[in-house]
Image (tube, rainbow, N blue to C red):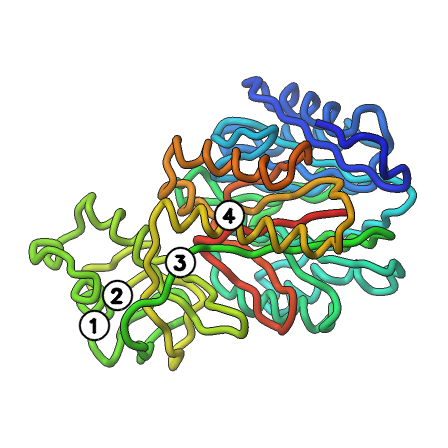
Amino acid sequence: MDQPESHEARWFGTGSSSTLDAAEATAAAVASATAGRPPALVMVFASSTYDLHAVARAADEAVPGDVPVIGCTTSGEIEEGAAGSGRVVAVALGGAGLTVRTSVGHLADGSREAGRSAAQGLVGLGRPNQVLLMLSEGLAGGRAEVVRGAHSVAGAAVQLVGGCAGDDLAMSQTFQLHRGEVLTGAVVGAAIGSEGPIGVGVGHGWRRVGEPIVVTESDGQRIFRLNDEPALDYYLTLVGAAPELFAEESPAMSAIGLTNTFGLPRPGGEEVRAVLGFDFANRSLFCGDVPQGTVIWRMVGDADSVQVGTRTACELALEGLGGATPLGIVAFDCASRRAILGDDGIAAEMGLLAELAPEVPIAGFYTYGEIARVTGSRGVHNATLVLLALG
């Protein structure tokens, strides 16, 4: 869907295809997004059911050789008011009022260095409004360090936004792409400079309950002890789990993890951390980016509160445009929110976004974690919706 020609210096287009052939699906999605116009940036979000090498080649062939194409695998795709799995979604930006530079960082070089490398496109960008969009590896830790590294280049004035790649909940391997190259363990950055306003909105709808909890032992990816007790036992007691769930994992555990998260206190509200898994052997929790010594809170939510987060994110993103008409919105929506909402809730969420931003093209993907930093040096999220609005 294309934005009407009211922003002659800048444009935003989206496209998608569920054709089974990866190259055909990608070519169709990119063609719809660009609509014959020369883009400054093309983003491709592809289901992990596709061969990403074929996706990368087709996307690169569909645009002029100097146009950067970035993207990643997903845990679901969003476009044209529909959300689901099994598509290739493309977002294209262009016009004389935009400048885009891309860069790549590799987590093997260290998380902070990867963030610094991904942000290099910001250096000398020279537009009045700037944002760094990052597409990161979805199964690695150190995300807070990635954001700190990017912040060291961006400074306080440039907003950060993005999402972590998915693999349709297989939790096996995620991929990123940059200029025809398929990567893993990478952070791809697109520095976007615009003559128009840029807004970032963050919303989750979770609420804090109970007393503060001290993370007494953690390695950054797993929590071993909470309030100096085995983390798994403390957590199951905290959420009122049935006694039989303490002995071995069962299907009921995933529902508990979805609706009982943790929150790290931050200025302006908590950053949510999802409980991604349970280790019965050493009684620990898989819950990334929760440093040892941190004070956290239990956070609770449901489908209704998740929709409150959707409204908050959209209103904040549009507010950031200062009254300007949005060209389009890029959505980074957590895979856990998708699971909480279910099919009916997803349809309701898409309807709410269409109501709040009528006739505005919206496209993006379901992530394994979100990046959003409006102020400060932090900005790592789970179970959260992040929206980037371009005016």
Residue at left 85%, top 29%? Answer: 37
Residue 230: image tag: 1
Q: Amino acid at mark 4?
A: Thr
Q: Is residue 37 above or below residue 388?
A: above
Q: Earlier in the sequence, mark 3 or mark 1?
A: 3
Horizontal and vertical percent for residue 6? 85, 35
Where does label 2 land, which residue? 284
Q: Earlier in the sequence, mark 4 or mark 2?
A: 2
Q: Earlier in the sequence, mark 2 or mark 3?
A: 3
In 3D space, how far apart are the residues under numbered discs 4 and 2 (Cα atoms)? 31 Å
Nearer the observer: mark 2 or 3; the answer is: 3
In 3D space, how far apart are the residues under numbered discs 3 and 1 (Cα atoms)? 25 Å
In 3D space, how far apart are the residues under numbered discs 1 and 2 (Cα atoms)? 7 Å
Q: Is residue 318 above or below residue 269?
A: above
Q: Amino acid at mark 3?
A: Trp
Q: Earlier in the sequence, mark 4 or mark 3?
A: 3
Where does label 4 land, which residue? 310
Where does label 3 land, which residue? 206
Mark 3 surroundings: few (<14), some (14-19) or many (≥20) residues within 10 A: many
In 3D space, how far apart are the residues under numbered discs 4 and 3 (Cα atoms)? 11 Å
- Asked whether residue 187 appears in the rendered view, the answer is no
Secondary structure under tag 3 reads loop
Horizontal and vertical percent for residue 152? 70, 73
Residue at left 67%, top 50%? Answer: 318
Residue at left 92%, top 43%? Answer: 96
Horizontal and vertical percent for residue 343? 39, 31
In 3D space, how far apart are the residues under numbered discs 2 and 3 (Cα atoms)? 23 Å
Secondary structure under tag 4 reads helix
Image quadrant in which you'd find residue 376: bottom right
Mark 4 surroundings: few (<14), some (14-19) or many (≥20) residues within 10 A: many
Residue at left 66%, top 59%? Answer: 105
Q: Amino acid at mark 1?
A: Pro
